[in-house]
Image (tube, rainbow, N blue to C red):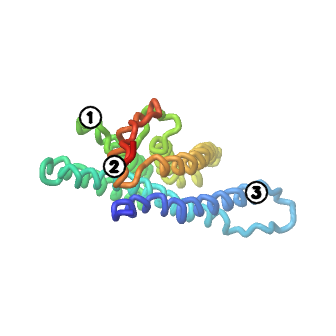
Amino acid sequence: METKDLFALVHPAIAVTVVFPLIGIVIHFAWQTRQRRLQPSGESKSKIPPTVGRDHVQLGKRLTGAVVGVCLLGLAFPTVSQALQNQTFTKQPWEALFLVLMFAATIASLVFLYQAHSRLWRVVFTVLTSLGVLVIGFQDSLLGRQQPWIYRRDFEWQVSHFYYGIVVTVLMIISLAIVQEIYQDRSNRWRLAHICLNSIALLLFIGQGMTGTRDLLEIPLSWQEPYVYSCDFVKKTCPTPTPPPGQP
């Protein structure tokens, strides 16, 4: 494996070792929190500790940061590698500067979202963070490129690791933004919205595990790219390989 291939493994490695274990822990605390809330007040002392709700919120916030971070890593690798390959930093410096600023602005918006207290600012930074992820993901459309730099499988968007990742990232950002609303709303509408959003996110996470594994098989190593990318991914055909010298 080349150095480029090792960098390509950073995104899936962090997803497997950090994000997915966090998902399991957050789901466990979410279930315990709900069980404790539904327990009748007349019953004996609950075996579930009273801190479980606070732990769920804290770990949920960390999960959101991890999801956004691993998403940006997944978008950054092909963006940087293609920019270096095409000499974008010297030939189109304004395009390169735009991409650098978008990554910085998205990260800054997420940091401000964690610190925002008023509803207005939470909405503003939620929109900015989500918009940053979308702009980076669909940068080729904005910059007028014929070929996307990011592996998207537009011809099978309904089972695309990219599209699942973008949607689940936005859902996690929204979930982070509405945490304060849950505790201020006595009608439990925000709590129900939180449950619905994260139930959808959980299904998408499962899809992420499946589609991510498939993409690791489909995305070639750097030295294999010229041949593999000459294949037709829609028709699932590849050119006939040239036989080695000395063979018919």
Whether 207 is drawn above or below 7: the answer is: above
Of the image marks 3 and 2, the number of the one nearer the N terminus: 3
Q: Position of residue 178 (x, y in %)?
A: 52, 50
**Along the polypeptide, which appears first: circle 2 or circle 1?**
1
Disc 3 marks which residue? 35
Q: Secondary structure at mark 2?
A: loop
Q: CA distance from mark 2 to mark 1?
A: 36 Å
Q: Residues within 10 Å of mark 2 (few under 14, many from 20)?
A: few
SS for dot 1: loop
The percent coordinates of residue 20 (x first, y second) are 57, 59
User: Which residue in the rendered view is the most extreme toward the right?
Assistant: 43
- Residue 231 disc label: none
The Cα atoms of the two marked residues, 3 and 2, are separated by: 69 Å
Residue found 34% across the figure and 40% down from its top: 138
| Residue 84 image-quadrant placement | bottom left
Q: How many numbered dots are placed on residues in this image?
A: 3
The three-letter code of the residue at mark 3 reads Gln
Q: Amino acid at mark 1?
A: Gln
Q: Is residue 231 above or below residue 65?
A: above
* Residue 198 is at least partly visible in this image: no
Q: Nearer the viewer, residue 154 or 73?
A: 154
Quarter of the image that includes the N terminus: bottom left
- Point 39% across, 54% down: residue: 221
Residue 97 lies, in percent from the top left, at: 19, 52
Mark 3 vs mark 1: give the one in front.
Answer: 1
Label 3 to label 1: alpha-carbon separation: 52 Å
Residue bearing mark 1 = 146
Q: Label 1 neighbourhood size at 10 Å, few (<14), some (14-19), many (20+)?
A: few
Nearest-to-viewer mark from 3 and 2? 2
Q: What residue is pinned by disc 2? A: 245
Please state which amino acid type lies under the numbered disc 2. Pro
Give SS at disc 3.
helix
